[in-house]
Image: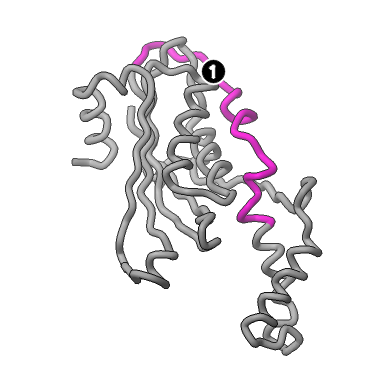
Amino acid sequence: MIHDARTCDGVNETSDGDVSHTPGFDRPRIEAAVREILLAIGEDPDREGLMDTPRRVSGAYGEMFSGLGESPEAHLARQFPQDGSDPVMVTNIPFTSMCEHHLLPFNGVAHIAYQPQHGRVVGLSKLARTVQILARRPQQQERLTQQVREAIEKHLDPAGVLVMLEATHSCMQIRGAKAHGACMKTRSVGGRWERDAATRREIQEMMVGK
């Protein structure tokens, strides 16, 4: 069964988490650091256009890094019975994350497929929230792909699981190589699909529509 997150009610819901309300998130310290950055590049942090920038950046970080104060477990633990063991697939789950190397955003879509083996599945929106929680922290795309797969394996124990991410990285587009339009694709496979090349290929072709 294939579901496209762009057309499924509830799947595009985003987490309301805000790490600024959790221990470890120091809003005044972030604001002071942003002010120092503005001074370091030769700007005047007290001029009209920049006076509120430290506060705005701190608020934005509270949202963009809200995954640090959340866990996918609360969502993936909400399971319900389902007859059969046909693969479940959700494609085109949107996400935005922050590259931990440059603290610049990368964004794209995630595709998830898993094969239930204990008669238990989760709602489609729970898979979307898992992606979003793990994305909203300093990340590498390779690690994010693996962490989504590991979370599904840990809480659903599927017979097989495959996670694929496609993303564009602003650190490649606005600096360095300036590779506009370049898309990075990563994949992480677990369970029997890791050993079954034919099924893995079939699932992946269904994901990308080829």
The residue nearer to you, when weighing 16 against 165, is: 165
Q: Which residue matches tag 1?
A: 80
Q: Residue at x 54, y 33 (%)?
A: 126
| Quarter that holds the C terminus | top left
Relative to residue 210, is residue 196 depicted above or below? Answer: above
The colour scheme is one colour
Q: In screen coordinates, is 69 left or right of 185?
A: right
Q: Residue at x 50, y 54 (%)?
A: 96
Residue 105 locus on image (x, y percent): 50, 60
Residue 66 locus on image (x, y percent): 65, 49
> What is the quadrant of residue 77 in the picture?
top right
| Quarter that holds the N terminus | top left
Q: In screen coordinates, is 205 left or right of 17?
A: left
Q: Residue at x 43, y 39 (%)?
A: 145
Q: Secondary structure at mark 1?
A: strand
10 Å crowding of disc 1: few (<14), some (14-19), many (20+): few
Q: In screen coordinates, is 122 left or right of 198?
A: right
| 82 inside magenta stretch | yes
Relative to residue 34, is residue 77 depicted above or below? Answer: above
Residue 62 locus on image (x, y percent): 69, 56
> In the image, which residues are magenta?
62-85
Q: Which residue type does callout 1 highlight?
A: Phe
Can you see residue 89? no
- Number of marks drawn: 1
- Which residue is at the far front? 40
Can you see residue 186? yes
| 97 inside magenta stretch | no
Residue 163 locus on image (x, y percent): 38, 35
> What is the quadrant of residue 149 in the picture?
top left
Relative to residue 31, is residue 51 depicted above or below? Answer: below
